[in-house]
Image (cartoon, helix red, strand yellow):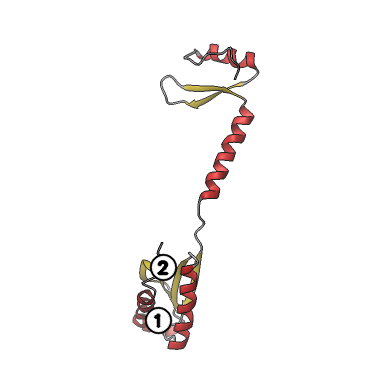
Amino acid sequence: MGDNVEIGVYSKSKALIIADELGLDLVEISPKANPPVCKIVDYKKFLYEQKKREKVLKAKTTKVVIKEIRFGPQTDNHDYEFKKKHSEKFLKEGAKLKAFVFFKGRSIIYKDQGEILLLRLAQDLEEIGKVEQMPKLEGKRMIMFIAPKK
């Protein structure tokens, strides 16, 4: 902005004339304020800097990764231990875990076994993860979410 323009309260027409003389744009920063707050800037540069700020903020956000572990209602002990080891690895990497028991055909009658299996997993992973959602039956799946502890 030029040195010959003072910061102050101007009417809209006066502000537009000043912006036009400088070859810049009048940008409304906060329209709800009384009086509305405007700035005399190069609009393209203003948009560029705004996009740059948004990009930096977006880069700082963490992306949530969800890993899935699938069990059957009658998963034997060796398979359970194998899948538990993978679950631990996922949680240590910082990913959320979606553990589910898939019931095929008539195996839905073993839903209590599926719930026991998921609760056992939650108890075994207690030190590195916390249960975000308790086991819940959705159709033919019983789903439980575990988030890593910070």
- In this view, the residue in front, 25 or 88, is 88
Q: Secondary structure at mark 2?
A: strand
**Is 109 rendered above or below residue 29?**
below
Outermost residue toward the front in this view: 3
Quadrant location, the N terminus: top right
Bin the neighbour count of mark 2 within 10 Å (Cα to Cα): few under 14, some 14-19, many 20 and up: many
Report the amino acid beneath label 2: Phe
Query: Residue 17 location, x and y as percent?
Result: 59, 12
Query: Residue 45 location, x and y as percent?
Result: 63, 30
**Is 2 rendered above or below residue 93?**
above
- Residues at marks 1 and 2, CA–CA distance in whole angstroms: 20 Å
Bin the neighbour count of mark 1 within 10 Å (Cα to Cα): few under 14, some 14-19, many 20 and up: some
Q: Secondary structure at mark 1?
A: helix
Disc ID at residue 108? 1
State which mark lies toward you, 1 or 2: 2
Q: Residue at x 63, y 20 (%)?
A: 24
Q: Which residue is mark 2?
A: 145
- In this view, the residue in front, 122 or 99, is 122
Q: Kindly check if marks 1 and 2 are in contact, taking CB atoms under 8 A apart as contact.
A: no
Query: Residue 56 location, x and y as percent?
Result: 56, 44
